[in-house]
Image (spheres, rainbow, N blue to C red):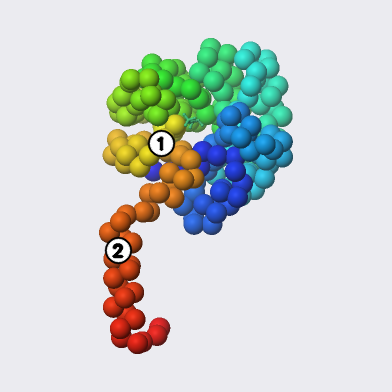
Amino acid sequence: MKFFADTADTADIAELAATGLLDGVTTNPSLIAKSGRDFMEVTKEICGLVSGPVSAEVVALDHAGMMREADILRKIADNVCIKVPMTIDGLKTCKALTSDGTMVNVTLCFSANQALLAAKAGATFVSPFVGRHDDNGFDGMALIADIRLIYDNYAYPTEILVASVRHGIHVLEAAKIGADVMTAPPAVIRGLVKHVLTDKGIEGFLADWAKTGQKI
Ligand code: G3P
């Protein structure tokens, strides 16, 4: 499963990229606002930090406006992936852009039928928001399982990008279901390495090593 960082914080992205575990980045207008930086400038910087896809979201709601914005965004770098909302205009834009060889991420997906539409529109990625789904009393991971089943039924190449990931259980369940990608805040990705028994084990080994008086 590919790991994307869901952030526009370039320091966090650089640190995660240095581990070799980062396959891409997703941003959205809220994350750009949180960074306090210029959209074009920060997106360009992120595209230079990772070689994988970097999702940059359009804000227009009509097809012509989305195409105009996408045309500006896709010139930033070759690894820009245009993020469009799950609307008729978003799907129309997705079809036009992917037919032209541009990567597209259809975002704000909350049902398996919406994911089916994204696949039919040729989306590179579909982003079901599992955390927000859970927050509203639905089962986010059941949605991922349904989408996996449907995409496998028809061999759709659209990648399932599990978004709105809040904790390690989301990551674990996404991997068990066979999602293609998960995007999570850097703190969630860093948290995956932590285990109390790992820390305790290191502490014990180092204490015993000190007793030997040896050096490597
Ligand atoms: O980038 C889209 C998605 O991951 C947002 O997550 O935590 O705002 O629901 P969240």
For ligand 1, tell me if the residue under mark 1 lies within 8 Å.
yes
The answer to whether one can see residue 196 in this image is: yes
Mark 1 lies on residue? 166
Depth check: 188 or 90 in front? 188
- Circle 1 or circle 2, nearest the eye: 2
The amino acid type of the residue labelled 1 equals Arg
The amino acid type of the residue labelled 2 equals Lys
Image coords of residue 171 (percent x, y): 36, 40
The answer to whether one can see residue 157 in this image is: no
Q: Residue at x 71, y 36 (%)?
A: 38
Mark 2 lies on residue? 200
* Secondary-structure class at tag 2: helix
Q: Residue at x 28, y 39 (%)?
A: 176
Within 10 Å of the Cα at label 2, are there few (<14), some (14-19), or many (20+) other Cα atoms?
A: few
Residue 146 figure quarter = top left
Q: Are marks 1 and 2 in contact (CB under 8 Å)?
A: no
Position above or below: 186 against 111: below
The CA span between labels 1 and 2 is 26 Å
Q: Residue at x 61, y 35 (%)?
A: 34
Depth check: 29 or 199 in front? 199
First in residue order: circle 1 vs circle 2: 1
